[in-house]
């Protein structure tokens, strides 16, 4: 294309680059508008150059039109390239010491004496690779923010589902009471809705912050990717600014999952009958309430949160408190003082595990480290703790119920058969954190926490 001159591509009539060129039978080409004007002025259909008679509607010279358009594009591209402000020469070199584009004359000037130069395209190639390296962690951070936001969106929707389901359960239980309990029902609903509003607002703020960070990261990634696609000279002119824009996101903290974001269902539903009916008469209560926010996705809890069994995987959002490594669920309340006891009906379940866990926030991939538990599997009882290897307990028979005693002052966790008062095992630990009751279910047989008077 560079071998074609303007003269080769110029109309003989207007002496400018062809516009919509047409070709005559004599092979001469003209701008369509120039030819029509010439014919109109001369009142004839002769070629303006050789005067040969031509057809009245000459065809478009498509090949010539393409050449002219390509020539104009190349000319505009060359004209758009910046020139040296000192010498008006093309910026073909890049000074490594000054980090700037220079022309041939600049290279030989005193200002660049003993400096190292690279061709602009070569320097652009190197700096693009460097900027791409800087961009990669920012792109990964963007993906992480987008993943966390997606889970926050899911959590925000699930909060609404939890709130509606919990509200339904509350209402069903209140129907069993007399009309004078209406005030208590309204108080519970109000508390639930206040928590729903509070936590929904919290998630909105979290999502808003994530959206803001994502927009900032997306803007940086988009702008940087645009710079990477730019011509070498333009890229090098804007490189420092692009680098600074990317580097300013390196120290942006990774997004953290929202702990405690879900509705505290156990607070609204736990011992609901006892707390209300206690105003009228004594009624049994359950010493431990299961926390659905900690339940593995394969588990289903009873409406009163006292029984758990395994079913198909539930579509639940990810949250830090949920059990992932074991198919288990925790009690809603942790204990770090006093003595506590709860009986669990294991029935005919061939596999189960009971105990206490010191950290309610779980890792999806790591085995819980601060877990004390006994397990029953294939007729054998075992004890597991963080400090000691698994041991087989020398106990025969099969228990229908297990009593768990937690003495926080003595730092002991003990297991008994409440029917025969048989001691099964005792852990002595040095944990100072709150211990949460732990229930592991791997089959359809439910584990049920027994009520006490």
Image: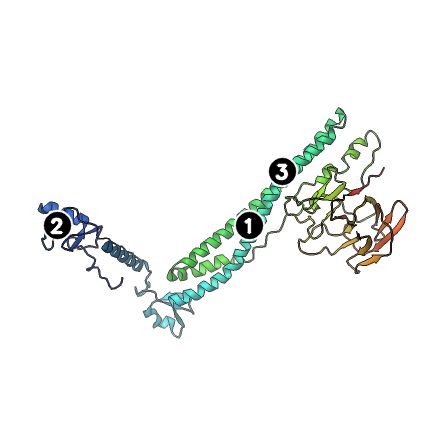
**Residue, far bottom:** 114
Quick one: quadrant of the C terminus?
A: top right
Residue at image coords 57%, 50%: 147
Is label 1 in contact with label 3 (beta carbons under 8 Å)?
A: no
> Secondary structure beneath disc 2?
loop
Camera-side mark, 1 or 2: 2
Which numbered circle lies on residue 54?
2
User: Which is nearer the eye, 277 or 33?
Assistant: 33
Whole-percent x, y for residue 55 in the image: 14, 48
**Residue 435 has which mark?**
none
Asked which secondary structure carries label 1, the reply is helix
Callout 1 environment at 10 Å: few (<14), some (14 to 19), or many (20+)?
A: some
Q: Earlier in the sequence, mark 1 or mark 2?
A: 2
- The correct choice, above or below, for 341 with respect to 232 in the image is above
Is residue 50 shown to the viewer in this render?
yes
Q: Which residue is mark 1?
A: 146
Residue picked out by circle 3: 160
Q: CA distance from mark 1 to mark 2?
A: 67 Å
How far is the residue under mark 3 from the one under mark 2? 80 Å
Q: Secondary structure at mark 3?
A: helix
Above or below — where is 252 with respect to 159? below
């Amino acid at each position: 294309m560079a071998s074609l001159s303007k003269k080769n591509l110029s109309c003989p009539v207007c002496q400018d680059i062809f516009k919509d060129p047409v070709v005559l039978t004599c092979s001469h080409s003209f701008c369509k508008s120039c030819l029509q004007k010439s014919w109109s002025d001369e009142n004839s259909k002769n070629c303006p150059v050789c005067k040969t008679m031509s057809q009245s509607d000459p065809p478009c010279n498509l090949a010539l039109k393409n050449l002219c358009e390509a020539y104009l594009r190349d000319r505009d591209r060359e004209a758009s390239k910046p020139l040296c402000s000192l010498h008006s020469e093309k910026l073909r070199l890049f000074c490594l010491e000054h980090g700037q584009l220079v022309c041939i004359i600049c290279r030989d000037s005193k200002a660049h004496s003993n400096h190292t130069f690279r061709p602009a395209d070569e320097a652009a190639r190197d700096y693009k690779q460097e900027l791409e390296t800087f961009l990669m962690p920012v792109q990964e951070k963007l993906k992480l923010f987008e993943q966390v936001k997606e889970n926050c969106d899911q959590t925000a929707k699930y909060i609404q589902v939890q709130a509606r389901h919990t509200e339904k359960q509350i209402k069903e239980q209140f129907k069993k009471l007399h009309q004078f309990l209406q005030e208590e029902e309204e108080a519970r609903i109000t508390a639930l809705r206040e928590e729903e509003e509070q936590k929904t607002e919290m998630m909105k703020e979290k999502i808003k912050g994530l959206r803001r960070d994502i927009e900032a990261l997306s803007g940086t990634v988009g702008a940087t990717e645009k710079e990477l696609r730019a011509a070498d000279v333009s890229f090098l002119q804007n490189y420092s600014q692009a680098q600074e824009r990317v580097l300013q996101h390196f120290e942006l903290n990774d997004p953290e999952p929202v702990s405690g974001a879900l509705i505290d269902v156990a607070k609204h539903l736990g011992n609901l009958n006892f707390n209300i009916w206690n105003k009228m008469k004594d009624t049994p209560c359950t010493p431990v309430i299961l926390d659905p926010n900690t339940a593995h996705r394969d588990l289903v809890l009873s409406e009163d949160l006292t029984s758990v069994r395994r079913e198909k995987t539930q579509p639940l959002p990810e949250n830090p408190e949920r059990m992932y490594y074991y198919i288990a669920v925790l009690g809603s309340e942790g204990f770090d003082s006093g003595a506590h006891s709860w009986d669990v009906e294991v029935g005919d379940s061939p596999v189960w595990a009971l105990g206490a866990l010191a950290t309610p926030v779980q890792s999806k991939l790591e085995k819980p480290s601060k877990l004390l538990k006994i397990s029953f599997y294939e007729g054998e009882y075992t004890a597991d703790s963080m400090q000691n290897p698994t041991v087989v307990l020398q106990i025969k028979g099969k228990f229908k119920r297990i009593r768990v005693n937690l003495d926080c002052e003595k730092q002991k966790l003990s297991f008994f058969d409440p029917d025969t008062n048989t001691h099964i095992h005792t852990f002595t630990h040095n944990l100072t954190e709150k211990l949460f009751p732990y229930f592991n279910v791997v089959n359809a047989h439910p584990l049920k926490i027994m009520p006490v008077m």
